[in-house]
Image (cartoon, rainbow, N blue to C red):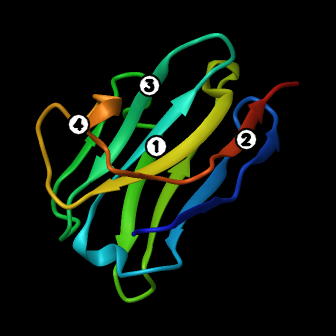
Amino acid sequence: QLHLVESGGGRVQPGGSLRLSCAASTLTLSSYVVVWFRQAPGKEHEGVSVINVSGGLKQYADSVKGRFTISRDNAKNTVTLQMNDLKPEDTGIYYCAAHPSYISAWAIRSYWRYWGQGTQVTVSS
């Protein structure tokens, strides 16, 4: 069982930045594809970004392209989501999730096997 923990959320003004981390406290995250989802109040989960095991394949939702960057450090067992130029519509709970295999339809929530508890991101002036 892979146990994931997110950190780094908080409140920031529009245009600001946050850095989210997803860490594994059991097993090694380096063997898993990792995705970030977010859920805004009253809305469905939205796939934000995904990274494959090697880190050589990264995908982003159109809404965050050019502003968010996903990366991983397999030696530290972590995946990071750097979020720049944040907008109020980026507000929500951010979750990381993992699966042993990558699929092109990575934004389908039901595919992902292991989930963290989420971290709140609020973008407001």
- Confirm or deny contact between disc 3 and disc 2 (CB under 8 A): no
Please name the residue shown 48% across and 62% down the image: 80
Q: Which secondary structure, mark 2? A: strand
Q: Which secondary structure, mark 3? A: strand
The percent position of residue 76, horizontal first and vertical second, equals 45, 85
4 to 94, vertically: above or below: below
69 to 26, vertically: above or below: above
Q: Give how far apart the Cα atoms at labels 4 and 2 are.
A: 22 Å
Q: Which secondary structure, mark 1? A: strand
Structural crowding at the residue carrying mark 4, measured as other residues with C-alpha within 10 Å and reported as few (<14), some (14–19) or many (≥20):
many
User: Number of callouts in the render?
Assistant: 4
Amino acid at dot 3: Glu
Name the residue beneath numbered marker 3: 46
Q: Give how far apart the Cα atoms at labels 4 and 3 are.
A: 11 Å
Structural crowding at the residue carrying mark 1, measured as other residues with C-alpha within 10 Å and reported as few (<14), some (14–19) or many (≥20):
many
The quadrant of the rendering that contains the C terminus is top right
Most foreground residue, 99 or 16: 99
Name the residue beneath numbered marker 4: 106
Q: Which secondary structure, mark 4? A: loop
- Confirm or deny contact between disc 1 and disc 2 (CB under 8 A): no
62 horizontally vs 102: left or right:
right
**Between discs 4 and 2, the one toward the N terminus:** 4
Amino acid at dot 4: Trp
Name the residue beneath numbered marker 1: 68
The percent position of residue 24, horizontal first and vertical second, equals 48, 73
**Between discs 4 and 3, the one toward the N terminus:** 3
Please name the residue shown 37% across and 63% down the image: 71
Name the residue beneath numbered marker 2: 120
**Between discs 1 and 2, the one toward the N terminus:** 1
Amino acid at dot 2: Gln
